[in-house]
Image (cartoon, rainbow, N blue to C red):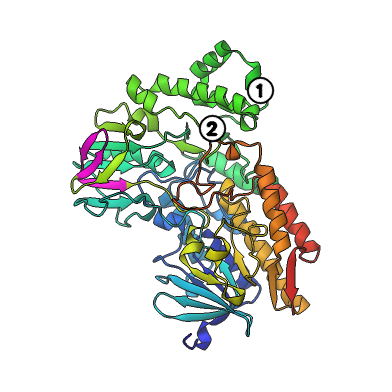
Amino acid sequence: MADTSPSNTVDVVVVGAGFAGMYALHKFRELGLSIRVLEAGNDVGGTWYWNRYPGARCDVPSVEYSYSFDRELEQDWNWTEIMAAQPEILEYANHVADRFDLRKDIQFQTRVESTVFDQTTNRWDILTQAGETFSARFCVMATGCLSVPNTPNIEGQDNFAGEIYHTGNWPETGVDFSGKRVGIIGTGSSGIQSIPVIAEQAAHLTVFQRTPNYTMPAANAPLQADFLRQAKDNYPNIRAEQRASQVGIVGYGFGFGGAENVEPTEEIRSTTAEERQRLVEEEGFLAIRRYADIALDEEANELACDMYRAQVGRMIEDPVTAEALMPRDYPMGCKRPVIDTHYYETFNRDNVTLVDLRRGGIDSITDTGVSTAQGDYTFDVLIYATGFDAMTGALGKIDIRGRDNQALTEYWEAGPRTYLGLQVAGFPNLFTVTGPGSPSVLSNMLVSIEQHIDWIARCVADLDQRGMQTIEATTAAEDEWIAHVNEVAQNTMFTAQSCNSWYLGANIPGKPRIFMPYVGGVGVYREKCDEVASNGYQGFLLRA
């Protein structure tokens, strides 16, 4: 490897300048460590930098989707909506970067090619695609869980002569759809958010749907000044409740979908068909949230799905389109919940066509559009809203090699293995932020990010205090943790036999099927991590 200049020899290299990388930089500075953040994009923001597609919005209340580490930051920043849109979240990220002068230690337009552990020096050698090298005692992978766009391999996909976009890598300048015929492939979260906005502008929008999704109305609205003031006054309690909760979301001031907070306490199996029909007519989709048994009981879940489909039928004018939009054959809750703004209403527009690929799939991409078993469709613009190689995709893009030149991709050939989602056996001093085996994408990412970075920072400080050079997970601890992650996921909708979600890697051909996030909850997970640290980093091997 080429010589590393003194300025590139640091205590910590962090890969990624999203919310995790930014907080890691701030936290390690507080410890007095030298740090360099390497970021592929042109600026901070991570997923909110890349995902600029129309309608992109967070599904967590704004007052809770924010940093908690600085009291003045909490008080000074004013969110404008119940659930903030991408431009406002990116503006917040830039505000934080400015406020704490973070950019001076971030190197932008720098994509990491490899990170290799040198057993003679106990340091990580990091090589960028431009050929620059760095040396660090610790390497923190803050690469994000939803940061590598997934574009399906479709015959002829290079033939299309028009404009092509992916929702996960949207142009900074935006896209003007006025007067254009647009085709969009995918109805996951990014598709559900962007379809209503694109339909308002395009001459015609054709939506290609493989699997209809369960989505709830966001009921988003501007934040009232008195509500925001009350939230700021109550921030200490809000943060404490977030950290002890299941998913890091309190739903402060309102429940899911912006409506009155309702704790699910009833059992749907004790209701009659007439009662369920009446609730659908009175409350629509939100009627479903009152039932506690649908998360664990597949028969109860199917009753809730019937209610959901009934409401879809009430909203969609064309019966054929309504039937196509009704999810079937997999349980509600097996995938990350999606929220929307006027999604179903969009399919009542004259300029929107739904192509249900269950009735005949895509054969190829042509120079003018998409050819399916149902016919050919012509566009000026083609959009892939096909999601991400989630949780492990970004790590797999980097050649990460630990002891004895072991490649991480080889070690994970049968699926990702970690201890606590923080470390991998055989990869000393390498930390993953919100990695597989942690609550991660099943949680409010800001809450999980802060917990991970705080734990890693405490670990680094403890190592120095004890005179230790390296820390790495043991294989035995990995085995026990993986067994625990799988155990708590059993008997939930996440692991139902009919559930194929990106939580399992099911959206990536050839990717091993293994349930990646930890279902036990952020509060329980935090307690486990703190207990491990307090017990002398039980399950880790520390070397002097």
Residue on which the image places disc 1: 267
Q: In the depicted view, which residue is nearer to us: 116 or 105?
A: 116
* In the image, residue 520 above or below residue 497: below
Classify mark 2: helix, strand or loop: loop
**Residue 354 sits in quarter:** top left
Residue 204: x %, y % from top left:
23, 36
Mark 1 or mark 2, earlier in chain: 1
Few, some or many residues within 10 Å of mark 2 (<14, 14–19, 20+):
many
Q: Residue furthest top?
A: 274
Query: Magenta residues, as a range?
Result: 369-383
Mark count = 2
Q: Is residue 50 above or below residue 3?
A: above
Going by the numbered disc 1, the residue's amino acid type is Glu
Most prominent secondary structure in the magenta stretch? strand
Q: Between residues 498 and 536, which one lies in front from this camera angle?
A: 498
Counting from the top left corner in percent of width and height, residue 215 is at 47, 34
Q: Quadrant of residue 317?
A: top left
| Residue at image point 44% right, 51% down | 388
Residue 374 within the segment the image draws in magenta: yes
